[in-house]
Image (tube, grey):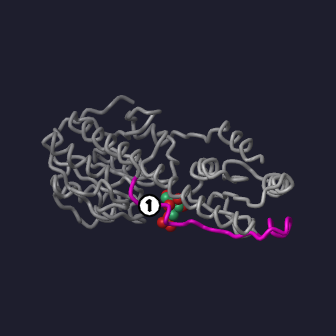
Amino acid sequence: MSKMQEEKKIQRIGVLTSGGDAPGMNAALRAVVRAGLYHKLQVFGIKRGYEGLLDGEISEMNAHSVSNIINRGGTVLLTARSKEFQSEEGIKRGKAMADIFKLDALVVIGGDGSFRGARDLHRIGVPVIGIPATIDNDIGCTDYTIGYDTAMNTVKEAIDRIKDTASSHERCSVVEVMGRNAGYIALNCGIAGGAEACIIPEKKFDINEDIIKPILSCRNAGKHHYIIIVAEGVGGSVEIAEKIKEATGITTNTTILGHQQRGGSPTVRDRVVASLMGAEAVSLLARGITGRIVAMKGENVVDLDIEEALGMTKSIDEGLIETSKILSLY
Ligand code: F6P
């Protein structure tokens, strides 16, 4: 599908953050507001994602509204997972509210679910641009999502700390990391954290072959501590730890890292990618181009048709899985 040229000149844009927060959302918001002002657009912040759109929690932003937020995790606009917006009725009410506030277009910063809402709005005549932001990096149309690098660095630091105590006590630690149904965080942090095994939802696993055997062969080679990464999409990390203890006799702890992975000041990569994506989203709107998702292909910022983008899938790098196995051999 070719890029859609809007007949009406875009002058007033709304911006919202939606779904799980991700470090760098603020940097993207800042870029949208500042680039919007540069292009002489009026920019309106919508609170609490689609919930705020439905409730009309919409107010104009200026350059100062986004001062001193590039360094902050979370989202100053607040966010929500809106159930109502998953219905046809909700989408229609969203359009009605965009009309009341005379918004010519919306910029949606969020993950897959948020993009489905954006696509549905676009289908009924609300021009949109999507910016991918989720720690999970699980959006098919883009190689990179805002927040992923910061989350991985948080996980890496946690693994390093857990390793200190696991090695002092000669224990095994099972560390469960986020990622929804994807293993990107788990696999990369398994490599970065020097894990003995890394279990991800994309690969079936056998507890004896993929966890117990590697631990025992490491022990026989003289190793005294073990880190096992389990992606939340696999689940059962407590049960896995019990089975390890049962089979090996090694004291095994479980740490579920949880929501700390979503917080914290964004890394340089997340700040820069978010800034580039935010600026690109507005540059498209200033040229009258809508119905696009801004994405990363390698190191380049590109834009894709929203309908096509939502149908895209990506798969985890098999080479990376192989390398992680090779490197975990003691
Ligand atoms: O999508 C980000 C994420 O943190 C996932 O990794 C996780 O599965 C989910 O959100 C948790 O969502 P909530 O904070 O709503 O429980």
Q: Residue at x 65, y 40 (%)?
A: 320
Q: Is residue 71 above or below residue 78?
A: above
Rendered location of residue 265, percent (x, y): 38, 58
Image quarter where the N terminus lies is top left
As helix, strand or loop, the secondary structure at mark 1 comes to loop
Q: Quick one: label 1, few (<14), some, or many (20+) residues within 10 Å?
A: some
Nearer the observer, 230 or 53: 230
Residue 87 visible in the current orientation: no
Q: Is residue 193 left or right of residue 85?
A: right
Rendered location of residue 310, percent (x, y): 47, 43
**Does the residue tagged 1 have its C-beta within 8 Å of any atom of ligand 1?**
yes
Q: Is residue 238 above or below residue 41?
A: below
Nearer the observer, 147 or 291: 147
Residue under numbered circle 1: 20
Rendered location of residue 74, percent (x, y): 37, 61
Q: Amino acid at mark 1?
A: Gly
Q: Is residue 301 within the magenta segment?
A: no
Specify start and end residues of the magenta stretch as a single range. Answer: 242-266
Q: Is residue 251 within the magenta segment?
A: yes
Q: Residue at x 32, y 49 (%)?
A: 28
Nearer the observer, 268 or 273: 268
Q: Is residue 21 left or right of residue 283?
A: right
